[in-house]
Image (tube, rainbow, N blue to C red):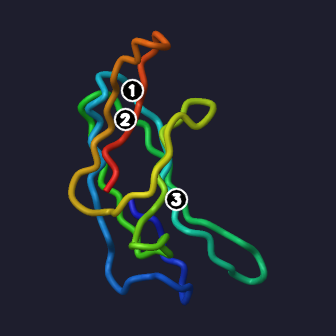
Amino acid sequence: MTLPHAGWAADVTPFKECATIVNSANQQVMGVIKTESYKFKGKILRHEKNFNLQDGETVAVCSTGPFFPGYKVELTIRTIMPLFTCHTRLSGNIYLRSKWDDENGVRVLYADCK
């Protein structure tokens, strides 16, 4: 899946930045990858791509931007509402994980962001 580029917006690259999202959470994980906002024809826009991965599935994600500082995109794990958000580089593997929170008695989803 490729996020389209923003034309002449700032913080874009002439080549694609790519990563593989790997679901290692032992459950289905849904989320979205978003670029930094940019202005086009007077409107503020963002490129975004949803993903829905079963345990063990992977998906390649590429973008030319526009990026947040450090050539990063926003990764959000969600259900109906956001559960975890970070900024990460699109390079190598990005692992989606889960862990048990003893204090609250729930399973927590997160990503190994770079």
How far apart marks 1 and 3 lie (CA) works out to 20 Å
Q: Is residue 5 above or below residue 95?
A: below
Question: Which mark, by number, is residue 53?
Answer: 2
How far apart marks 2 and 3 lie (CA) works out to 17 Å
Name the residue that disc number 3 marks. 34
> In the image, 77: left or right of 95?
right
Question: Please, which residue is most extreme toward the left here?
Answer: 92
Tell me the quarter of the image containing the N terminus. bottom left
* Residue at x 38% of width, y 83% of height: 13
Question: Where's residue 3, x and y in %?
Answer: 45, 65
Question: Where's residue 70, x and y in %?
Answer: 39, 73
CB contact under 8 Å: marks 2 and 1? yes
* Residue at x 41% of width, y 66% of height: 72
Name the residue that disc number 1 marks. 28
Question: Which mark, by number, is residue 81?
Answer: none
Amino acid at circle 1:
Gln
Query: Considering only order in the chain, which callout, 1 or 2, is on the residue closer to the N terminus?
Result: 1
How far apart marks 2 and 1 lie (CA) works out to 6 Å
Question: Where's residue 62, x and y in %?
Answer: 35, 65
Mark 2: secondary structure? strand
Mark 1: secondary structure? loop
- Label 2 environment density (alpha carbons within 10 Å; few <14, some 14–19, many ≥20): some
Amino acid at circle 2:
Leu
